[in-house]
Image (cartoon, rainbow, N blue to C red):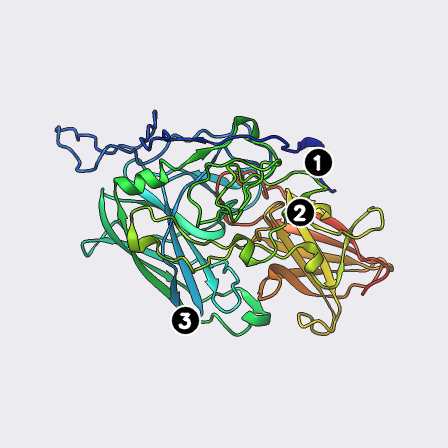
Amino acid sequence: MKQERYDTQRTIDRRTLVRRTGALAGTVALAGCTGTDGEDDENGADDGTDDDVEAVPEIVEVEDPPEAVYVPTHREQMRTLEPIEDGDVAIAPMLSYPHPFWIVAGGGEDSVERVDPEEGHGVHMMFTAWDRETGTVLPVDDGVQLRVFQDGEQVGSPLSPWTMISQEMGFHFGDNVSLPGDGSYAVEVELPALSTRKTGGLEDRLTEAASASFEFEYDEAFREEVVGGVEYLDEELWGERGALEPMDHGDHDHAGEADDHGHEEHSHDDEADDHGHEEHSHDDEDNHDHDGADDHSHGDHDDHEHGDENEHAHHEIPYSQLPPAEEYPGTLLREDGADGTEPTDDADLPRSGDAAVVATLLESESRLASDERYLLVSPRTPYNRVPLADATLAATVEHDDESGTDTVLEQTLDGEYGLHYGADVAAEPGDDVTVSFEAPPQVARHQGYETAFLEMESLELTVPEETE
């Protein structure tokens, strides 16, 4: 059944200001923070870390958030390092303060587990990986290895970062990494060959493992940048149905005003929106589609006095955004009992667990099909169109003669249509198609996504009588 989401949403039609954690003069005051910088140990010895800025900001969380995508209380700050290329793959490392995230194993509310960072020093280390030829962000499979070194000695044990989604970063992988204190660190990251089925411009490619090495400085300046740069949204937006816009890594200073919808304006006059809040209005949702990598590519950095670490003005980091519904070929399936019109944009798509779902039937002549029609199902986040990977989907086609066929939909990464689930099906005009979510997306989530995409009900769809 389609979710009646607009009855519970309101359009943000006023201008609001973001509250910064630091004073305007540049002095960062974070009362109640959980960091332990500069504290003496039990013997009275200083730990050698400057205590001017705490390691972790005080983050207020939304009480009783909806079982859907919602606006968090704040916008994070991060440092983006120079992308690294290895063969067909590019990898962009990003660093922020340690913060909670949620992992999913199985389905339902009981499958979600919150992961809190350890106390003390550390970073939240994130990576976006993409195919250099097509710009497609890669849903890196399990098997990523991460090692951190200081002065040639490995810090802790190797880590296996989690695949994650966030409103600002889209699909990426990352983890909290504990550090012994201030200093220079070297990182080695290894990505396995992509095992997901690949089609189109990705077919028979990305079959080799990739690796990247980089260095970063963890010090007071870093903490002032990422902790002191946290921005709190207007309290009336907290928990509202909606999402932050994708982050523009070229703009670390969001101290401007929002547009009338609380929606971030990546304008060319250096005025940035403070809310990054996507318009909720049904009528205006098309106006906020992010079509194409250039609209939200991660561009230039301000020089935060870190020289080479931020000198990548011409390196664009793609955001994992799927095409809008109208750009998919074939015939979009309708919900059972719909008014006879097919969806015209993502706002009209069927919903399951607050995920918007494109379900389209491609003719047998399609490059994705073999002998029969190809059913392409593309679940995505409802505002930024981030793909929902590592779910388990199946389809049941019921014919007029009351016979039916069950088909498992295979996760597929296509160079043109992005991540989706698909298979050949014997479906004809007038047939009913049930798309079942046997397991929700098994990806970790940042705040604002942790209550969505968990209880995913089946979708009852119909193949229109007239197909293309």
**Nearer the N terminus, badge 1 or badge 3?**
1
Please report the residue visible at 69 percent of the width from the left and 42 percent of the height from the top: 284
Q: Residue at x 80, y 65 (%)?
A: 468
For label 2, the residue is 287
Q: Nearer the viewer, residue 262 or 406?
A: 262
Q: Would residue 190 be seen by someone viewing this image from the given angle?
A: yes
Q: Nearer the viewer, residue 264 or 427?
A: 264
In the displayed structure, does residue 264 sit left or right of residue 76?
right
Which three-letter amino acid code belongs to the residue tagged 3? Gly
Q: Is residue 199 above or below residue 397?
A: below
Q: What kind of element bears circle 1?
A: helix
Q: Which residue is mark 1?
A: 6
Residue 2 picture location, percent across and down: 73, 42
Query: What's the CA distance linking mark 2 and mark 1?
Result: 17 Å
Q: Amino acid at mark 1?
A: Tyr
Q: Secondary structure at mark 3?
A: loop
Q: CA distance from mark 2 to mark 3?
A: 37 Å
145 sits to left or right of 12 = left
Residue that numbered label 3 is attached to: 87
